[in-house]
Image: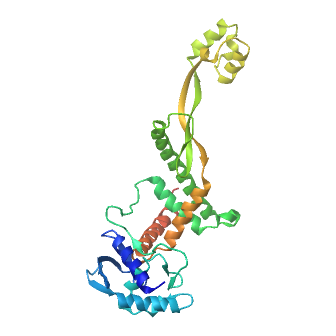
Amino acid sequence: MTFASTWGNVLDECEALEDDAMLITPLSDQRFRITDVQEHRVVVEFTDSGESRPLQRDQFETLVDRVRSEVGGFELDRLPPEADPYPAVLSLHPRFEIDKQTGTLRETDEPTPSQFVRGISPSVETERTAPDLDVYSDALLLIDALEQYDVTALEDLETPSLINLYTLLSDVQRNADDLRGDVATVLLDRVHHDQPVHGQFGSVQRTSRTYRSLRDEDEVVETLEEAGIRRERVTSVDSTKVDEALEVTELAASDVYEIEQREYVRKAEVNEEEKETRLQGLKDRLAATDGSEAEELREEIEELEGRINDLTSFQSGAEV
């Protein structure tokens, strides 16, 4: 492929970006956006400093020549600091890819998405905020604990570690059940038949379950006596004794039980493959986090570690 064709593709990709699309330089992790696309250059503006800089066509051509002449890709640390935006823009081309693990820029045989476009526009990009839910906080603590402890060998864990795990698991289960109940209440108004309704991770369906409770004790005893059952057999009006009595009479359960039928939502199936795919995607995105995002993540982890120490440590003489 000639450079003229490559350059044309780069310009097309630049023009296709949203006005507020952000790119990140691979070495210094600076955010910038493309403000102008011309025949012989691309003008960029750095977010932090507001500095505007033209990126020349001939410099892109030199970079492409170096990429194509290197076996295994061009090493990015060989670039001068002022050239840091060039590989980020070139990676918009579907056949040029920045490999953060190897620190190289290389040309690929198959199209690959740019790794450095972030936040297409303010209308699309939303700030990640932690929900004010107990289950969210407990889940974060549990995740951290699971990363610290080897739960594949529980017998090898010390007692305080097992106590921490048990406490967190109990809290997550309790709070998750509360939230699940709230979700089920809303779903009940939206699932109107007994056929499964599907989501990304699984499906639910509407079903019903019958509950019953004994009527007033005197009423139950009187009804049974009229049916030939002596009072002594069910004096305590124990439900087990009542059931035994019903088996030898022609009385219906509704004659002695208040019967209430409730509808609820139950899980019909779980899409484990989709869950695994989504989970792996989250892990990969976390592993690729860099720059300011990495700093924010480190601060969150430090805060989380402090909370873990406060919530899960045990001191002599403390009440538990």
Comparing 75 with 153, the one in front is 75
Comparing 267 with 97, the one in front is 97
Determine if residue 314 is in view. Answer: no
Name the colour scheme. rainbow
Residue 229 in the image: state x and y as whole percent.
70, 10
Q: Is residue 91 above or below residue 143?
A: below
Comparing 37 with 237, the one in front is 37
Splitting the image into 4 quarters, where does residue 124 fall? bottom left
Q: Residue furthest right?
A: 248
The residue positioned 49% from the left and 70% from the top of the image is: 286
The residue positioned 36% from the left and 78% from the top of the image is: 11
The residue positioned 57% from the left and 12% from the top of the image is: 219
Q: Is residue 259 above or below residue 140?
A: above
Numbered marks: total: 0
Comparing 231 with 215, the one in front is 215
Splitting the image into 4 quarters, where does residue 132 fall? bottom left
The residue positioned 58% from the left and 64% from the top of the image is: 146
Residue 50 in the image: state x and y as whole percent.
25, 80
Residue 241 in the image: state x and y as whole percent.
69, 20
Residue 28 in the image: state x and y as whole percent.
39, 84
Q: Is residue 225 left or right of residue 29?
A: right
Determine if residue 145 is in view. Answer: yes
